[in-house]
């Protein structure tokens, strides 16, 4: 079994977040939290990404974007919804243009609640995502 | 003959390990310079191992062939150098290898990828004159283009070629994709919207470009070492020390500067080439005619 959990590369996408969660996601890469010590790289390219981190809910405009990014990521891949908005739609739930949480368009594996989600809980979510990423890679291996 | 084969095999086997480790040390030092703890020094190997376990999304049929040719030519370049072959030939195969990467990236229809490949061509335009001057400089200093003769002199080539050495270290920054010259693609400590020339490469193909880069870095640092090496053993120690200093310098430059516009890169690289490289050659020529 290949060890893939030492190198999870993140792709961060801002749905219709208020930017609160985004700032917390970026805080994870700063010297205080430094997620790179786990091998995490914040990439901007879906072709390179393993973990899809979404903040904010889905609206009628970014629905296709999220679907496309998800389809462009090579498997195994894990989706993490960061913040209450990404989990359920949050405070924007009743807005005319909001469809709901991320799971209305793509399958979500890990939910990180909080408004805004704290860097500690985001890192916790990523660590859980990494374990799942390894599981999925193993499953792919045994299918071969 | 047998020593040649040992050298080639040693290069082909050891270069990816040394290159990968250097990359890991680079990331660790970069993180420390930014006040972070940073990943393990073996992180590049973890990355490559993971990439080989990912699905490969091929954008077109040619991609895999072109990326593999890139790796093949880089390996060939290093093998040529370590067999003591003609330096000009080494540099030409190195350029050919770089062209395969450009082809792999512009064979896709992604705009990010094509911008990356165009910028890679601009970078090549910027550093190529200095690369050729380096080969010519070695010829002036030692009377031969052959790597085996260059390292067999009584005097280190750097004594005759200080300017060329400075110029070569300068373009090394471009070649190693270090800031401020990382136009076509940057490395991990830097944020990037999309990954330039490697945008459309996924899984194993991306891993292969990484490995090719490790081979390439070892090749380039070997050239740096060649400036020092002569018949004495001390020179080999000195060469290793200089290579380490140069590599550290590259990391320092990388972490203290922001990316430049392409036209500035071109002007700066050519100015350095003409001033450092050109003057060095002229002085050498004048001195030779005097003696
Ligand atoms: S969960 Fe709160 S902080 Fe995060 S995007 Fe929604 S409203 Fe903003």
Image (tube, coloured by chain):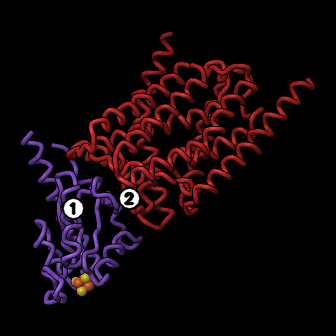
Chain colours: A purple, B red
Q: Residues within 10 Å of mark 2 (few under 14, many from 20)?
A: many
Could you say where residue B123 lies in the image, as x and y percent from the top left?
Answer: 56, 47
- Seen at 28% across and 57% down, the residue is A46
Q: Is residue B113 visible?
A: yes
- Seen at 65% across and 38% down, the residue is B129
Same chain for marks 1 and 2? no
The one of B195 and B5 positioned closer to us in this rendering? B195
Q: Secondary structure at mark 2?
A: loop
Looking at this view, name the residue that lies furthest to the top.
Answer: B1
- Seen at 55% across and 26% down, the residue is B90
Residue identified by numbered label 1:
A68
Could you say where residue B105 lies in the image, as x and y percent from the top left?
Answer: 39, 44
Q: Is residue A88 above or below residue B162?
A: below
B33 vs B37, left or right, is: right
Chain to which mark 2 belongs: B
Q: Secondary structure at mark 1?
A: helix
Which dot, 1 or 2, sits closer to the camera? 1
Could you say where residue B259 lies in the image, as x and y percent from the top left?
Answer: 55, 60
- Seen at 46% across and 54% down, the residue is B186
Numbered badge on residue A126: none
Chain to which mark 1 belongs: A
- Tell me the distance, in whole angstroms, between the alpha carbons under discs 1 and 2: 15 Å
Q: Is residue B232 above or below residue A30?
A: above
């Amino acid at each position: 079994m290949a060890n893939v959990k030492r190198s999870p590369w993140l792709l961060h996408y801002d749905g219709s977040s208020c930017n609160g969660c985004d700032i917390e996601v970026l805080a994870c890469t700063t010297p205080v939290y430094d997620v790179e010590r786990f091998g995490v790289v914040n990439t901007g390219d879906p072709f390179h990404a393993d973990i899809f981190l979404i903040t904010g809910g889905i609206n009628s405009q970014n629905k296709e974007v999220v679907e496309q990014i998800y389809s462009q990521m090579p498997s195994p891949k894990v989706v993490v919804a960061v913040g209450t908005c990404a989990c359920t739609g949050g405070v924007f739930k009743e807005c005319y243009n909001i469809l709901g949480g991320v799971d209305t368009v793509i399958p979500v594996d890990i939910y990180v609640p909080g408004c805004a989600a704290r860097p500690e809980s985001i890192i916790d979510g990523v660590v859980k995502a990494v374990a799942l990423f390894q599981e999925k890679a193993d499953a792919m291996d045994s299918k071969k | 003959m047998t020593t040649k084969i040992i050298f080639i095999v040693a290069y082909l086997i050891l270069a990816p390990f040394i290159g990968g480790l250097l990359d890991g040390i680079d990331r660790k030092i970069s993180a420390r310079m930014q006040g972070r703890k940073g990943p393990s020094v073996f992180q590049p190997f973890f990355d490559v191992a993971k990439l080989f376990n990912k699905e490969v999304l091929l954008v077109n049929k040619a991609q895999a062939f072109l990326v593999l040719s890139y790796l093949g030519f880089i390996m060939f370049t290093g093998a040529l150098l370590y067999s003591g072959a003609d330096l000009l030939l080494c540099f030409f195969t190195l350029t050919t290898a770089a062209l395969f990467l450009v082809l792999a990236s512009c064979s896709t229809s992604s705009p990010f990828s094509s911008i990356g490949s165009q910028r890679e061509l601009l970078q090549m335009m910027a550093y190529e004159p200095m690369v050729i001057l380096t080969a010519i400089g070695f010829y002036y200093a030692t009377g031969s283009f052959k790597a085996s003769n260059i390292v067999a002199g009584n005097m280190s080539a750097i004594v005759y070629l200080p300017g060329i050495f400075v110029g070569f270290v300068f373009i090394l920054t471009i070649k190693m994709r270090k800031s401020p010259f990382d136009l076509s693609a940057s490395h991990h400590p830097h944020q990037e919207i999309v990954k330039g020339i490697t945008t459309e490469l996924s899984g194993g193909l991306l891993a292969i470009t990484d490995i090719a880069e490790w081979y390439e870095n070892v090749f380039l640092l070997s050239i740096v070492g060649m400036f020092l090496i002569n018949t004495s053993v001390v020179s080999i120690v000195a060469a290793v020390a200089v290579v380490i200093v140069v590599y550290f310098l590259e990391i320092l430059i990388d972490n203290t500067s922001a990316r430049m516009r392409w036209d500035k890169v071109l002007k700066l690289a050519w100015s350095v080439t003409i001033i450092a490289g050109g003057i060095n050659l002229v002085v050498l020529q004048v001195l030779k005619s005097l003696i």
